[in-house]
Image (cartoon, helix red, strand yellow):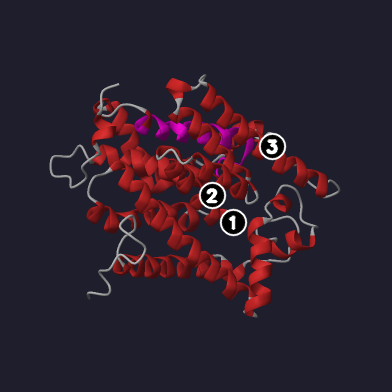
Amino acid sequence: MNILNKNILGKKFPPLLIHLYYFFIACTFCYIYLQKFISEANFNSACDGGSIYAVITGIACKPVQFSVLIPFLFKFLLIITFLKDKLLFVLISIIITYFILLSFYLLLNCYFKSKAHNCWLAPIIIYPMIWNYVILNGQFFFIDFFVLLVIILGFYFIVTGKFLSLLILLFIGTLNHLSSGYLIIAYLIYNYKNILKQKVVIYTLAMLIVYISVYYILNEIYRQNAGYFIIYFLQNNIMTLKHLSVHIFLRDMIFNFGGLHIFLILYFVSGEWKKFKGPMLYINYTVIPCILIVFIFFTMNDMRNYISGIPFILIGCLLYLSNSENSFLKPVDKLLQKN
């Protein structure tokens, strides 16, 4: 037990016992995901979310072809490990899920005082993941796990002021999926008071240059590929709303994010949000443009498209629950400061 209680990575990280806890939770979640999606995934198709081999050979449809990060990492590991492709993808998913849990723990430390509680609380993020990745999800896409990891880490880098790390992460995340652009929005919301100051303007321009440049270069490389980079989907979504069965609509509205957004609505309706002020609170409003962008450019009834909003919804929900009389969640002083 003495070995398990050691902080092998330093005081910033949890003890070895917690790392093992996260690893086995990651294995459990990915086993469920394997049974529903990975086992039936078609890695050879050209135009759906499983097009790993098509992306590697450069023949996938846009914008799937622009998601080059996971396929080329997959190819490299396939060469050096000689594992079967789906087994390898499960192992990659487990590693990413483990880092999702660890990153969310670091993010929780920015909001709540007790690191001991945060250690054990971090896997709560698996709850909305179960709903959006498994229960309500209808399509496998190899980019999804890494999308959430990028958003959580980016969230953490923004609230801790690690801009260089944020810029590098944005570059890596953009090679995976265009949803990394939500980090630019989150950065601007967090810096709402200083939005016109030179530092914020320069950092925002730097992120925009990285984001736009990556997609410009990818578009030049894969100019001949079929498909479109961005699709204006608003009219289709409006038509979907008109014809969607009531029970399907209610299911998606209630169980997206595992229903945690309902607590967030209560948070604002009750006025409890007034106890917290400042950028640490307001950055969670990033979920609003996330949802609006999905409605305009993506399929609204595909729960995968809301994955980027999970950390913002969950932190907001936990802040609401921290107001409970018997809550063990104690927000940090910085969050309670009057602005």
- First reached walking from the N terminus: tag 3 or tag 2: 3
Going from N to C along the chain, the mark reached first, 2 or 1, is 1
- To which quarter of the image does residue 167 belong? top right
Measuring 46% from the left and 48% from the top, which residue is drawn there? Answer: 153
Residue at 54% x, 50% y is: 147
Residue 298 pos. (x, y %): 62, 40
Image position of 231 (left or right of 301):
right
**Up/down of 211 relative to 121, above or below:** above
Residue visible at 60% across and 31% down in the picture: 238
Q: Is residue 309 above or below residue 77?
A: above
**Which is nearer the eye, 332 or 274?**
332
User: Residue 225: x, y in percent?
Assistant: 82, 50
Q: Residues within 10 Å of mark 1 (few under 14, many from 20)?
A: some
Residue in front for this viewpoint, 2 or 40: 2
Residue linked to disc 2: 304
Furthest residue in direction top, as rendered: 196
Q: Residues within 10 Å of mark 3 (few under 14, many from 20)?
A: some
Residue 232 appears left or right of 191: right
Rounded to the nearest angstrom, the CA distance separating label 3 from label 1 is 27 Å
Mark linked to residue 212: 3
Q: Amino acid at mark 3?
A: Ile
Residue closest to the eye, 206 or 277: 206
Q: Which residues are magenta?
A: 280-302
Do labels 2 and 1 touch, CB within 8 Å? Answer: yes
Which residue is at the front of the view, 40 or 187? 187
Determine the secondary structure under disc 3: helix
Q: Are marks 3 and 2 in contact (CB under 8 Å)?
A: no
**SS type, badge 2:** helix
Looking at the image, is mark 3 or mark 1 nearer the viewer?
Answer: 3
Magenta highlight on residue 285: yes
The chief SS type of the magenta part is helix
